Image: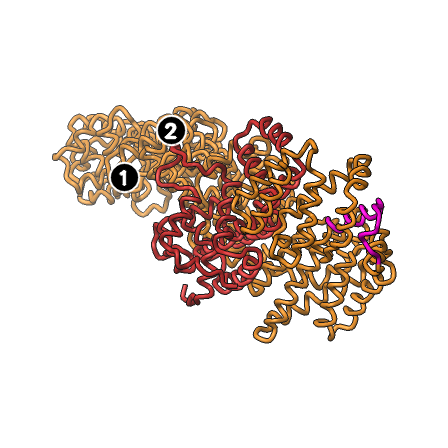
Chain colours: A red, B orange
Amino acid sequence: MTAEITSKTQDQLNLSALVLMNNYKKADLNSWYGFDIEDHLQLKNVERIAKLHGILSGVHLRNSLHRYETGEMASNPFEKLAMELRNDTTNTFEAKFNAIKNPTSKNAYKLVWRYRFSLKDQKLYGYEFAYYIFLMRIGGALGFIKPEEIAMRLEDVDTRMKKTFSSWGEFHRNVCIGDEFIRGASEPDISKYPGTETLWECYQRLNIHHADRFKEWNI
Amino acid sequence: MLEIFKNKVIPKLELKELEAPNTKALLQVLELQDCQNTEVFEQLKNSVDNQNIETVFTEDLAQQIFYHPEIYANEKEGAAFAISWLPLLENGFYPDKKSTEKLIAFLYFNLGFLQSEAISEDELTQIFSVLKTLVHSESSASLPVARFLMHRALDIRDCVNSDFIIQNCITYEILTGTYSVLNADKTFSKYPFRINNEFVQHFYEGDWHVLVNTMHQMLPVGKVYLPGAYNVMQAWLSEELAAFYQENTELAHVAHKALNERFLFVEDEGLALLNLQTSEGIFPLITALGSKQWDAGDVLLFNNRDKNIPQEQLDQCYQRFLDWLKADRGSNFYTEAFQEFGKHILTEENSAVLPVDFIPFWFEKCNPKTGIADQIELYNSLFSRFLKANSDGKLPVVRLGNEDVQLTGEHLITEVFQITENLNVWISNLASSNISDPLNQFLILAFYDARETLPTLFNSENQEVLFGYLEKMAYSAKEATEEIRKANLPLLVKTLTALFAETNNFTRVNKIWALKSIDDSVLNLCNDYVQLQYVNENRLLFLGLLQSWYNFLSDYYYSLGSESVWVPHMLNTQGRRSAAYLNELDENVTSFVNKALMHLFDFHKKSKQKAESNEFFQSIKTDIENYLEDFLKELMEHNLAKETADNMFIYSKAHFAHRKTLQEAINKFHDHHMVEAPKSEKAVLIEQLQTSEIDFSQVAFDPKYANAVLHNLENYKTEGTCDSKLLEVLDTNTTAFNTWLTEEPTIEAKFIKALYMTLLDKDLAPETPLEPYGNLCRSLFVQLAKDSKMASSYEMGLKAMANSGAYPENLTTALLQVVNDLKA
């Protein structure tokens, strides 16, 4: 990767910093891909992550991007449930909640109930586009997408995010909520694989180590 | 002059009864024996002198000269006597039958003596010259001497003497050429030394079996690197012998054994016998290999077969060879026979000589899961030849029955592998390997060959399995050599595109499309396929497909045209069609069309901005305009919402000045909504209310206000008007409003819901321009919700909202105020 990263591009890439760090603790936030593609082991890791997201080629990658872009991954299911819950009262909601057995669904209900009004407009777009950029970086590392294309897409995503959110904090909160909606409870879980952390934890760490990056929400 | 003749024979001659012609013959004999100086010669010469008569050598005279048994009593003299015959024989004076038999008897009992040092090389040479002359002579001595030599040579019980005779017969070329037999009419017939009925009659009393068995016994006998009985017999081999073998297969099998032993013990081949041919061109000893169970020796023999044997005589043999390879769980792989000869059998000819059964055998042995490593390697190298013919994507020719058959994929799938039903189990082992495995390459070839029939051969479940397999192979090609990749990937992709030519599963289509990035060789194949799938006028459209078209436009745009290359084609050809489809739909498509058009305009705008810097964006802009033009010309007016039409109209003015037709199409929609849009009752009311100078404080409650307010509450965001005056009417006429609401529970619920939403709107928070409207909403909400069943729920909900931290401080305060008011 030779193309230089302008401060503007860097700012745009930072939209995926949280997700990137969550997936790879040692990621280099200042690079296009976050991974050193010359490093065999890191490249293996990239391949693993790509495979985890079902990305085997450029076509797969772009189809994934579509899914994130159109809200198919999180926003649409979120909105569908939120719309339903907006008509509920505390009591009817509790009845519904208690009737659910599946802990994952329970978690989703709880979360959507909590944000059913506040995220009416933003939905989970922050989360989705953070992933959108993250996947582009992964795809870029594997040669599925060229830097020019990444740059162009970044530009448009950035515009959209800056319109949708008013601060880094708001944006990152949305990323974390989205992650919680998709992946489930964020309470520390001792049964988890050691070394993994929740996105909230990662968010805290990111803000400690890289606070400067996330001060100004450059529109 | 030979002493033995002078001393032993001459004295015994009986001259008295000799006729003149006989005398003349005797004279010649004496001359030949250098006996001109003897008395007898003088005497005889005088008696016939000057008489011009024929010489006649009678049997009596012959006996006088050749029949002297007493000489044979002394072996040395016997040998000398025999040698002394040579000049006579060379001049046509042959011994009679009786004398011959005596000589044979002498030789028989003195074979040991002849091999002793008592006999010089020279003498031996002369003795065998005598025998040779006799055998080849037209005399009654020919057959007996030949028979004697033959029987002695082929006498398995006496190998020393046998070898002695054999070596000399070969040296002096005795048992070749012809021999003579006396006919009943005293004439002689010449016969060649070739095995046929007469030969067997003459030497083995007509018994073929004795001869053949004798030959078999003698085949393995002899010394290494020296000629043996086989070399003698080789000259006798004949089509008649071949015919005999053909009729007596069991003897052919015995011959196999003998030939094998010959190879083992003498380390020499018996090719002439092995490849014996009948007059009809049958090779009986080879074909006989096809009718028995093989052992290592048969592999050896088969490996030595003649190269010109017609294939149909070999088919059975290849089958037996395969049986042998399979026997004992394939342990013959490790035998010397396989390593030295078996491998050669499999490599010397092209694969077209092998029966089709070798293919399942190959698949069994080289199965990456169940095969044995060293066998896999070798068998793969041997059977990869099945692939060699594949440069044109064809399966190999093999033998099926007794015919050359061009293999087809269908035959392999249904008959050979029989995998139409249980594909998953069968293929999972192969899938564990990769495309570099020759088996997988062969399989790809087979599926490719059958690509047109695959949809009928496999049900959808198995098609799924097949797809999984082929996709895995395709991706494994990334690790394969370029040669393998370039040779196999196109076949693989063509198979998939044929198999899923009619699919409706676009996830699958995309997966096939994705294969394009593995290698350039399949780029166009994949792109062509996907274009045909996404843009195919023979298939019905559906909303999801249109949606994908617009989505892929973004890929095309962002990738600068390197991805989704079919998008321009779609944009330039599908405008009318997609509009016609939408016109036909029963459902309301305005929202879909709105979204789609916004998307297209978005990209049009972006492209336009960049058009100057890059030709590509200019072309994409034109393509989008073309699509829009076709689409909007065709689309019926009611499919476009007023809002969309208006937006388009505004955009069109600014950006489509150069496209008159497109502008006209857009104007059409705009005009339609200008004229048609019937104003709703509410809208009319709102208009009236807004324009009239009414003192609202004096206005009494009227249900029509309620509807107008509700409409405003629900739509103020999008319509952008916050009608505080209307709200005030309700706020001041609370009692009447409440009474009316109790009779309209659904409207009440709608009101509360709409008001609830306004509470959470940041734009209506205190210290914003719209605060009055917000305050009215908060107040009205409290009035309506207070003391209702739901009051406590709202209280809790709003409190939670306020405390969630998601709202600005001023709104949080306002919310908490509402909570307090509800409690009060």
Tell me which chain the residue with mark 1 is part of. Answer: B
Please determine whether, in this image, residue B655 is positioned above or below residue B152: below
Q: How many marks?
A: 2
The disc placed on residue B522 is none
Q: Which residue lies under the disc numbered 2?
A: B295
The range drawn in magenta is B694-713
Locate residue B793: give its quadrant: top right
Tell me which chain the residue with mark 2 is part of. Answer: B
- Give whichever of B523, B193 is nearer the camera: B523
Q: Is residue B698 magenta?
A: yes
- Give whichever of B384, B505 is nearer the camera: B505
The location of residue B246, given as percent across then percent down, is 49, 31
Q: Is residue B119 magenta?
A: no
Q: Is residue B25 left or right of residue B285?
A: left
Please indicate, yes or no, whether residue B145 appears anywhere in the rendered image: no
Q: Residue furthest left?
A: B117
- Mark 1–mark 2 distance (CA, rounded to whole Å): 27 Å
Q: Residue at x 78, y 40 (%)?
A: B735
Within-10-Å neighbours for mark 2: few <14, some 14–19, many 20+: some
- Give whichever of B66, A130 is nearer the camera: A130
Q: Residue at x 81, y 62 (%)?
A: B669
Please determine whether, in this image, residue B387 is positioned above or below residue B113: below
The location of residue A33, given as percent across then percent down, is 42, 57
The location of residue A184, given as percent across then percent down, is 50, 37
The location of residue A42, given as percent across then percent down, is 36, 51
The disc placed on residue B227 is 1
Q: Amino acid at mark 2?
A: Asp
The chief SS type of the magenta part is helix
Query: Which of the image's four quarters has the N terminus of chain B?
Result: top left
**SS at circle 2:** loop
- Give whichever of B615, B290 is nearer the camera: B615
